[in-house]
Image (spheres, rainbow, N blue to C red):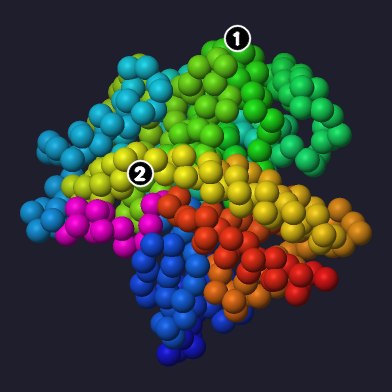
Amino acid sequence: MTKDLLGRHRAVLPDWLALYYEEPLEITHGEGRHVWDSEGNKYLDFFGGILTTMTAHALPEVTKAVSEQAGRIIHSSTLYLNRPMVEMAERISQLSGIPDARVFFTTSGTEANDTALLLATTYRRSNTVLAMRNSYHGRSFSAVGITGNRGWSPTSLSPLQTLYVHGGVRTRGPYAALGDDDFIAACVDDLKDLLGHTRPPAALIAEPIQGVGGFTSPPDGLYAAFREVLDEHGILWIADEVQTGWGRTGDHFWGWQAHDRNGPPDILTFAKGIGNGMSIGGVVARAEIMNCLDSNSISTFGGTQITMAAGLANLTYLLEHDLQGNARRVGGLLIERLRTVAAHIPGVREVRGRGLMLGVELVKPGTDEADPQAASAVLEAARAEGLLLGKGGGHNTSALRIAPPLSLTVAEAEEGAAILEHALRSTIQ
């Protein structure tokens, strides 16, 4: 049955639509932190549909909210008043930390970043954008144009002029050998130098922790230091929180809060986990920025009643059950467990991240060279033992990505770590 579905998939879908595993699996249902495939195999899910199943699979509170809303009305567009959308915007506005905030809902993180770029370039009357090396912001034409990761950027054509800044990757690149303070100072100097060679940019867009790039991040405070330079030039700061938002990093509700010395970002984008699988994305910005557009617009599928019902139930569950605190506690135990394992496996270069957003970078033993074949082999070995992982990486890097639902228990974290340890030892050594 699975082979038949794979054949049908390949016959009607693009070749570039990536599938994991030599024998791709069809996930049919899930519960809690587990999913099952069409052959009845059970897996502990350490990737959550690419950081999207944020609380739990088939969370009763969310499924009930969706079912009840579907029985009333599913969709009416933004041309009509929408109570669940207003309620969701009120909550996100308050949680964002941005003063006098306005919220616009989209269907994805890609569309959210597109909107943020539209707002920034219109507000600043500039089509120049600063982005981070090794970054990823989506698959639309404009988002691909600012993506600093060659593996996910199929064209150099773009409506924007993009200039890339150092700092998103702490342990590689020309400043890797520096201490944290000197690293930040060197990146700030690089930013200042770059600004001396270009017309005034509209904004800097940055992921507090780079997702597709392999869960890399700068030292805390880098973007606060950047902010001082940006403010001198009137340049906006866009925090791409599509993967880091809603408490996933444990220490903070938003990733930008690790860099908050000079206040919140001007624009914040979100998506993925807030819908727990429903298609919700969005942008938060100060009113003067959000309202700078001088033409009409709508969002046909952004903020529909059914997605907002899911998001409200999911957010309520997250906050009432302190899943941010759980991510901090369980994630802290998990990263220490994995670092202990990695110390005895030469092919593991680094275990990094925070909360339940962890990366395990793999290299060919005895070198600093990326080993994507090993990453694929570990994924296969882990799957065979009942664990689903993600992978990523940028220039000359290869990493396993670990991002389970934030309700992960200590026992499940230990189970997953044990499977991953065995997968690493059996494939790399």
Mark 2: secondary structure:
loop
Residue at image location 41% in from the left, 23% down from the top: 97
Residue at image location 73% in from the left, 52% down from the top: 339
Residue 194 position, x and y percent, is 72, 22
Quadrant position of residue 353: top right
Residue placed most toward the observer, 210 or 249: 249
Q: Is residue 290 magenta?
A: no
* Label whose residue precedes the other's in the sequence (1 or 2): 1
Q: Which residue is under mark 1? A: 232
Lateral position of residue 273 relative to residue 404, left or right: left
Q: Is residue 88 visible?
A: yes
Residue at image location 79% in from the left, 42% down from the top: 172
What's drawn in magenta, residue-wise?
Answer: 54-67
Give the residue at the far right of this rendering.
366
Amino acid type, callout 1: Glu
Amino acid type, callout 2: His
Q: Residues within 10 Å of mark 1 (few under 14, many from 20)?
A: few
Q: Is residue 122 visible?
A: no
